Image (tube, rainbow, N blue to C red):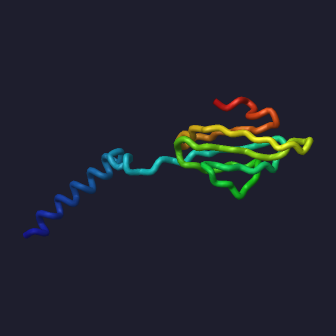
């Protein structure tokens, strides 16, 4: 007798899940964002959130949404050390690009 009562409850629950999938959306993780880091000249070291990345510029990194500290260090054509640092807000599912030159970010990063 208990199985007869349980079956309609399960059917109702499954119907609700199929009819209202938006109810589960809050439990889905956010889509990552993409950050393309470039430099002039290429081959600079990239540090994101105080972790040195294993790939030099140019490269596209996949990051979780939110604030990230990004530093690019390299040498200009004259061999002088250059550095660019910024705090970037990466949006879920969005793509963003930054370019570091001897004069700083080009265009300037806000």
Q: Is residue 5 left or right of residue 55?
A: left
Count the marks: 0
Query: Picture quarter containing residue 96?
Result: top right
Quadrant placement of the C terminus = top right
Q: Position of residue 12 (x, y in %)?
A: 21, 54
Q: Nearer the viewer, residue 6 or 25?
A: 25
Q: Nearer the viewer, residue 21 or 101?
A: 101
Query: Picture quarter containing residue 103?
Result: top right
Which residue does the image show at 73% across and 39% down from the upper left? 84
User: In this picture, is 76 found above or below 1?
Assistant: above
Q: Residue furthest front?
A: 81
Quadrant placement of the N terminus = bottom left
Q: Residue furthest left?
A: 1
Q: Nearer the viewer, residue 75 or 1?
A: 75
Q: Is residue 64 left or right of residue 80?
A: left
Q: Position of residue 13 (x, y in %)?
A: 24, 55
User: In this picture, is 78 found above or below 17?
Assistant: above
Which residue does the image show at 15% across and 64% down from the upper left? 6
Q: Position of residue 48 (x, y in %)?
A: 64, 49
Which residue does the image show at 45% across and 51% down from the upper left? 29
Q: Is residue 67 left or right of residue 71?
A: left
Q: Position of residue 60 (x, y in %)?
A: 68, 48
Q: Residue furthest right?
A: 78
């Amino acid at each position: 007798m208990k199985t007869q009562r349980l079956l309609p409850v399960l059917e109702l629950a499954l119907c609700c899940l199929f009819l209202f999938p938006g109810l589960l959306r809050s439990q889905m993780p956010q889509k990552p964002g993409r950050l393309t880091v470039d430099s002039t000249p290429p081959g600079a070291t990239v540090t994101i959130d105080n972790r040195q990345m294993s790939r030099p510029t140019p490269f596209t990194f996949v990051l979780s949404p939110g604030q990230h500290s990004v530093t690019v260090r390299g040498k200009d054509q004259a061999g002088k050390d250059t550095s660019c640092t910024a705090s970037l807000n990466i949006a879920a599912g969005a793509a963003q690009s930054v370019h570091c030159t001897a004069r700083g970010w080009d265009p300037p990063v806000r």
